Amino acid sequence: MTPLLQVRDLAKFYGSRRGCEGVSFDLYPGEVMGIVGESGSGKSTLLSCLAGHLPPDRGEVIFDTHGHGPRDTLTMSEPERRMLMRTDWAFVHQHARDGLRMGVSAGGNVGERMMAVGARHYGDIRAQAIDWLGRVEIAADRVDDKPQAFSGGMQQRLQIARNLVTGPRLVFMDEPTGGLDVSVQARLLDLLRGLVREMGLSAIIVTHDLAVVRLLADRLMVMKDGRVVEDGLTDQVLDDPQHGYTQLLVSSVLQV
Amino acid sequence: MTDYNFAYLDEQTKRMIRRAILKALAIPGYQVPFASREMPMPYGWGTGGVQVSAACLTPGDTFKVIDQGADDTTNAVSIRKFFEKTARVATTEETARASIIQTRHRIPEEALSEDQILVYQVPIPEPLRFLEPSEVETRKMHALEEYGLMHVKLYEDISQHGAIATAYAYPVKVEGRYVMDPSPIPKFDNPKLSMAAIQLFGAGREQRIYALPPYTKVVSLDFEDHPFEPTKAAHDCDLCGAADSYLDEVIMDDAGGRMFVCSDTDYCRARRAAGHIGAQGAPYEEATA
């Protein structure tokens, strides 16, 4: 089986300061990988490099494209990479406002990706937008409301609908539950878990919340100071942490 | 008056603008940056159009200016006087006699011919501007032909109003490539954009020139189930009785009285001179025209 994403020796420096270095892994179709670490450990830098938002200084990010098989996304032409970003890839931002058009209705937000790949039938676009709002538990009568009128949790769910509507194969998520209260977090996680399983998505989730990776991720990478210090199956890493930093991280979780 | 160079601008500036115009004609719909000059009028009054006209005028030209279709509004009168003074070219109000027509908001009703140039005054040349504020990003979108966002605007129109409510500055796709804002003309005029005359668009404040060569294919954007429809007031002209021209609504009193008249004053005058009379029209007399 061809891995969906192969990352080889990825490195990004900010001047002489290390963003991340020496990151290599394979991600297989249907697999969800979590990246955890403290603030400043390089996990967001890594995600930005993977998703093509930041040019890394070294390394390869090889994606198994639909038409042409595995290709290095860093050496692709910009139109190809941007096409990938709005078809096979999706990016869920921590703050929904970064990922949504706040001046455009919920339906328009969900419809944008469809129109970006050529949908030109209003009725179809709208029906699919309403269908997707339903799947993220937003009532159909909110389809013409702007995201400003939504709560934080609804905005986040809208962002997820907007990203998943074109059936991407790989989703990047940057702290998808950050800034939400715990009960809303729980519902969002439930929803994400359902969608990921149902659509057979692969996902890379960056978070500092161990509960999120415990629920969603099959595999886990622990980062510290820009390097991966431990990786493995989620339950294995969380239940039997080997590296000193991972042990600290796991023991820091508050037990209620 | 010999204090001005012909048509106000100096020769170097006109050469610079002509180069931009040639490039714009070579890439229909593409916005060519140019070094817009200060003109003796405020931005928004047609500084872009005036510079393009100045670069195109020759002493043998006949010049016509319309504003909202009319030859006799402030903006049209001042620009016409400006070139009468600085270029001493002949001016006219008759569409067919003009070789260069500068316009704001309208395309003349009468079909233009191959030896005419239509110059538009453009306020905001970027059709994606109100959807994407970043110029860097919009240029990239044009370069990569990423125009999905334009349809988001039309989608929003339909979801709010039940139909595409954009009535002017209706986006078009030029020769299957660039999405272009056809200046603030009503969408009634959009089908006329494929025409025999050269069309030049000048945006002074935004420093952009773009163009449509003769017979360029121009398609108004729409949805399959909400096709593009040119619209006009459902009336005939009250002065000349024309049923096919774009109409202005004129409020007559404070008791709800109103009349609809052709926005193209020259078209209306010519029809009345030919003996057509609308519902509220009087027989045409040369002296009252």
Image (spheres, rainbow, N blue to C red):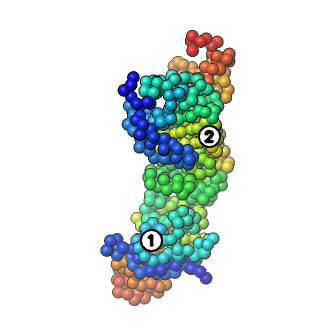
Residue under numbered circle 1: A49
Q: Decide if residue A30 is in sight here.
A: no
Residue pictured at 50% horizontal, 32% vertical: B57
| Picture coordinates of residue B82, whole percent (x, y) | 44, 26
**Nearer the observer, B116 or A1:** B116
Residue under numbered circle 2: B214
Report whether A12 appears left or right of B234.
Answer: left
Chain ID at mark 1? A
Report whether A158 appears left or right of B219.
Answer: left
**Nearer the observer, A174 or A152:** A174
Q: Are the residues under badges 1 and 2 in a single subunit? A: no
Please identify the residue farthest to the left as the structure is shown. A16
**Nearer the observer, A27 or B104:** B104
Report whether A20 appears left or right of A142.
Answer: left
Task: Name the quarter where the C terminus of chain A is drawn.
Answer: bottom left
How many numbered callouts?
2
Mark 1 lies on a secondary structure that is helix
Mark 2 lies on a secondary structure that is loop
Above or below for B97 versus B131: above
Residue A63 is labelled as none
Task: Name the quarter where the N terminus of chain A is drawn.
Answer: bottom right
Chain ID at mark 2? B
Closer to us: mark 1 or mark 2?
A: 2
Residue pictured at 41% horizontal, 76% vertical: A11
> Which of the 4 image quadrants contains residue A229?
bottom left
Q: Decide if residue B252 is in sight here.
A: yes
Give the amino acid type for the residue marked by disc 1 in the picture: Cys
Residue pictured at 53% horizontal, 66% vertical: A77
